[in-house]
Structures are given as C-alpha cells and as structure tokens.
Amino acid sequence: MLFKTPELKTKEVEVVALIDELKSKLSYALRQPTRWFGILRRSTFAKALRGSNSIEGYHVSPDDALAAAQKEEPLDEKTEAWFAVNCYREAMTYVLQLADDPYFRYSTDLLKSLHYMMLQYNLLKSPGKWRPGYIAVRDEAKNVVMYEGPDADQVPRLMEELVESLNTDGGKTHAMVRGAMGHLNLVMIHPFRDGNGRMARCLQTLILAKTTGTLAPEFCSIEEYLGRNTQEYYDVLQITGGKTWNPEGDTRRWVRFCLTAHYRQAMTLLKRTKEMHRLWATLESEVKKQKLSERMMMALMDAAIGYKVRNPTYRSAAEISDQVASRDLKALVTRGLLLATGSKRGRYYTASELVKQIRESTREPKGIADPFGQSP
C-alpha cells in the first residue's frame, strides 16, 4: 500500500488551473524569438541542480553549479559537493532526454539506474541498489530519529507498486499532483542507503518532464524552490509522513505545499523572462553605443545576472576561438563593462558598477503571494 492521492477540493482545482495558465504564459513568452533564451535555460537548470543538492548539505557556488550544468571544470576545488552536483547533472540530463521518448515506461531498473548516475562518485553508498536493511533519518543536531523507513524486505514490492501506479495512471491525475505523490512515496519508502531525497525530487521532475506540453522541461521543476525553502519542505514531509512508514496518513497538506511551489516557481520564471528581456535590450543599447560586437552580449548577460565569466565559457557560448574570446573580454574591461580578477587560467570577469546598475534597473518587484490566499 502506498500513500494515496487526496481528492482535490474546489480551491485546489482552482489553483491547478491557475498554475496551468501561468505555465501557458511562460511557454508563450519563451517561444518568442529571444536571443537570451539559452542563457535563461542553462541558468534555470543550474539553479535546480544547486537547489536540490543543497537540501542534502552539498553546497556549491552558483558559478560551479553553472559549470556543472555546462559540463565544465569548477572554479573552486573539486570537493564531494562538486562531484554530487556533477553526477546529479548526469541523471537530470538523462531525465530531460526522456521527456519526448514515445516508448517510455517507468521501471524499478530505470530508478536504480538514475540512482547509480547520482551516486557513482561514492561506491560505498551502494549506488543503483536497494538498501539491505534498516534505515532512519536523524536530526544530528538534536541526536534524535525523525523517521524510520519500512522494513528492507518490503522495499522491492513497494517500489514495484510505485512504478506500476505511475504507468497505469493514464493521465487521470494532473501531472503536478502525480509528481508530488511520486516524490512523497519514494522518499517515504526510502529505498536506498543514501540519496533518497535527491532521487525523490528527480522522480518528480521526470514525471513533470513527461507532461510539459509545449513548455521546455527545464522550466517545470520545483527543485530550485525546494532548495530555497528547505525547512518548510522538511516540516511538511515530517507532518505528512509521520515518524514511521504510515501510508494511511493525510497527504493533502503535502499536495498543497507542492502546488504552492509550482505557482511560486512559475511566477519567478515569468518575472525572469521580463527581466531578461529588459536587461538584454538595455545592454544591447550600451554595446551599440560603444560600437562593440553583438557577440559580447553573451559575456555581459552572464556577468549582469551575477556569474563569473571565464574565457572557456564565453568562447563556447559565442562559438569563437580562444584568441577572439580573450580579445573580446579585454575590450569589455577597457570599456568599463567588466572587471578582471586573477591571472592566466584562474582569471575571471565580473560585472562593472555600470552593468550592475543596469541590472538593478531591470528588476521586477519582489514578493509572490500564496495561491491559497495567504500574504506573501
């Protein structure tokens, strides 16, 4: 027996419709011919990678998350956190590839494979294998057990039941609700020795990616939101799941939490599309005024949204040689648009005060309301 999907009440149905409308607007905004689409897409992917791993205590800088998203070397040292994020990127990239596979079916082998991709950096964590025995989630600070998973001998049967429920749903349950329940059931079964939270969030993103419609799957994940609201995420999981495996518990609060996450993430992305449009237009005007090449916009946009620009990243984005990239970046420093730090291989570039001022002038107002009626 698994945790059951609650029958949606009128308000929840209204919120689902509201989110669908927001995602339709987002899809339309991103279908327009936009030269900044690729920048927003990889930035969104990087934020999801960073957000999901930060929940498990694997913290990397925004720049290293972006490097992982682009399969580049990190700016900082290759720590365990870097390997965790890099391997998570491999699993998530595969998930995004599955989005348009017409022959796709959920299976326990697929989930084990995704788990192996995520944890292959540490074979002591038994990547790709069900846990062999007892497992508990502990609050190390308080030295107390917060949750105990079901007996290990129940795991294979429960996981088969989970994938079968996903394969036989037939679209009866809205993807956002189905994703929430897939997430909840996997994390409560706790089928692996480690990485259960990451796997649950990855499964939720996979369920969403399979039903994105015209919206690119990178923009359907709520992993960035969960990373920014970790304590609330933990709290609602604990309230819903209890202290031991109890699939008869009420799941409505969890579903509402996930719907709120979808609403706020969609609103955040809509704000970003508006900001990116204004930012590109303002920076483009400055580039033209200074009679610089339009290709330099790729470096300026990354710097403006807070990233450290490196020669390899810029030349890959602009599709130019190392020599041309070096010349461009030097010109941007000379014109007062970028600041250089470090030397040789360690050199990177950041936004100048002028570019920072331009960025601030393009921001949308802060604050997003709760779709269920509470204040921001």
Image (cartoon, helix red, strand yellow):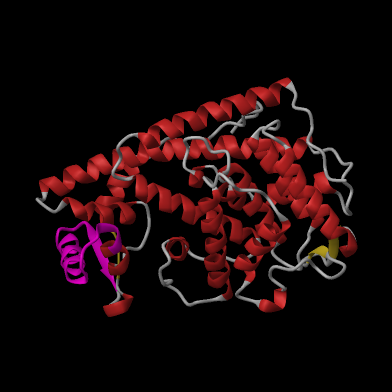
96 or 102, which lies in front?
Answer: 102
| Left or right of residue 160: residue 40 | left
| Left or right of residue 264: residue 37 | left
- Kindly give the residue lying farthest to the front in the view shown: 103
Identify the residue shown where x is 43% and y is 52%: 43
Compared with 174, 52 (above or below) is: below
Q: Position of residue 330 (x, y in %)?
A: 17, 66
Q: Is residue 149 visible?
A: no
Span colored in magenta: 316-341
Q: Position of residue 20 (x, y in %)?
A: 56, 29
Identify the residue shown where x is 59% and y is 33%: 376
Secondary structure predominantly adopted by residues drawn in magenta: helix
Q: Position of residue 329 (x, y in %)?
A: 20, 64
| Left or right of residue 20: residue 277 | left
Residue 126 covered by magenta stretch: no
| Left or right of residue 236: residue 278 | left
Identify the residue shown where x is 78% and y is 66%: 130
Q: How many numbered marks have been drawn onto this rendered protein structure?
A: 0
Q: Is residue 208 visible?
A: yes
Compared with 38, 65 (above or below) is: below
267 or 152, which lies in front?
Answer: 152
Q: Position of residue 358 (x, y in %)?
A: 28, 45
Residue 336 covered by magenta stretch: yes
